[in-house]
Image (cartoon, rainbow, N blue to C red):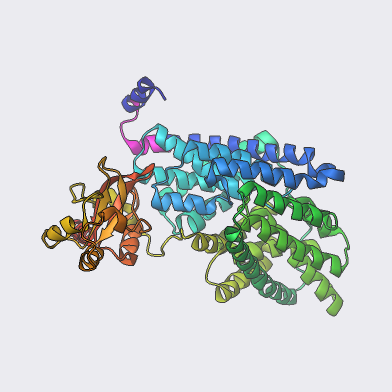
Amino acid sequence: MSSGFRELFKKIYIKENQLLLILIIVLGLLVGVVAALFRASIHFISAKTYLRGGMWIFSPVIGGIIAGVIIRICKETKGGGVGYIKKMLSYYGGRIPLKVSFFRFIGSAVNVGSGFSLGPEGPSVKLGGGVGSFLARTFHLSSKNTRVLVSIGAGSGIAAAFYAPMAGVTYMLEEIIGNFSAKIVGASFIAAVLAAAVQQGMAGHILMFSIPQFKLLSPYELIYYAVLGLFVAPISVLFVKLTVLIKRVSRKISVPIEIKLGGVGLIISVTALFFPEAMGTGYETITKYMSARASLEIVASLLIVKLLLTSLSIGSDASGGMYAPAFFLGAFSGILIWKIFSLLFPVPMASPGAYAIVGMGAFFGGAFRVPLTAFLLILELTKMNSSILFPLMLATGVSYIFSLYLYPYSATEAIMVEEGSAIPKEAGGVLEETLVEDAMRVDYDAIPGDFTVREVNEILSLLPFSSYPVVTSDGEYIGMVIGSSIKRAFVKGEGERKVKDLVVDSLSHLHPEMPLSIAITRLADSPTDMLPVLSPLNHKKILGVLSMGDFMKKVMELSEKGK
């Protein structure tokens, strides 16, 4: 945006909050356009590759190699994108580079479109958040409002992907933000509706799968749905654990990412020779098996194969989401339960499609720990069919509680824990609104890396802290040095050793726009009594430091203001 155009906005809109409301409307429209183009790209690639059959069934190999090259260019393209959005909101103030969104669009379209067992909805979250970040940077919004715009953009991405604005809002509150904030609910309604409407206007109302007739034949049938919830819960936990295990093993395989994803694509292609229905998002397969009278063995086999291929696709860091495959797993779990019950108890039951729909909600709630979003999502997809209310609530609730008992993490949380980027549970409250830049000190002592251990040891007793940042002669950050390490080296007779040889460069660091709720957790877990505050764009540039004393001083100030 030109400086003149920006100045015009400053004259028209006096307050940033007024500008924010305008940008939320723009955000909803843009997310709808981006989501529609993204889905159209996936459909185009699918139609030109594995859906053509024949030798095109090996398209995941080529798709994996291409996506791997894109990930090599921009590593933030890997994975589903939800964890990335949460990490950027908590640690980087919602600042998402435009190139990440650009390469995410291409990489995910190629990976999903070529036949990997992935979905477009997770990447839509990242693309929506990226649009929000772009608008916030363009109009120079504050860190607080940047996070608001990114969060609403992420929720709007889900709303557009599923044509489900209510689920998009609850998803933002349950998954992205982690708490219910009344301040932005109304604004997120606007953006979510606009995003879904634009998506529908550009692509038409494409049904991802057919909606079966649903009727609860007897109150006693609720027992079957409760059992379905109990059945789905351990499968959802198995899905999460298997994905994390594959991710752990994949990280130890030291081959280029494009070769790794090409190999995964080959496994998918060979498997598809026997189970072609397990490729891609699986929405067409769900529709087919809702009405088809397939054998129990085929349904169970497809459930197992899809579970393995999805865990392999996600665990290998392919660029795509988990939600479409989760629907597949939930639907086939429901169909499997229907078949078992129909064999054991030959009494009138709802259709297998009804159990498939309820199974989707139950699996979604169990795997991602967002029961309200799962409930509303299925309701919106089934056009608010009131007959589904009790079975859906029961199965989703049972699955959520039982899966929580079996395993403490959602799929997103488990992956973030495995990657070392988990968001502390303490995040929230007034410390969520106060940033590191509000408490850090910009006047601090730094030790030149070329100083010797002897030189530093002589002045160590005069310094107030037990650890300090070490910098080069040009002021670039090298790492932290701990006073006890200096003393130990001096006692060992290493007085002429350079201090830069003793730095610990693996310690945590902070960013200016990181909430204090995150900073205090990192401080508490650190062996040092202060942490460096680095530029999010250049980790060699140190902007200040934050000590526990600085944190407590800011907390006291906040307490005084609150009285």
Q: Of 68 and 409, which appears nearest the observer?
A: 68
Which quadrant holds the C terminus?
bottom left
* Quarter assignment of residue 339: bottom right
Q: Is residue 259 above or below residue 289?
A: above
Q: Is residue 435 above or below residue 66?
A: below
Which quadrant holds the N terminus?
top left
240 part of magenta stretch: no
Q: Position of residue 133 (x, y in %)?
A: 45, 40
Q: Position of residue 407 (x, y in %)?
A: 56, 73
* Quarter assignment of residue 562: bottom left
Q: Of 431 and 204, which appears nearest the observer?
A: 431
20 part of magenta stretch: yes
Which region of the structure is painted magenta? 12-21
Q: Of 59 and 113, which appears nearest the observer?
A: 59
Q: Specify whether residue 178 is in view.
A: yes
Q: Specify whether residue 53 is in view.
A: no
Q: Is residue 524 above or below residue 469?
A: below
User: Residue lying furthest top in this view?
Assistant: 4
Q: Position of residue 328 (x, y in %)?
A: 72, 58
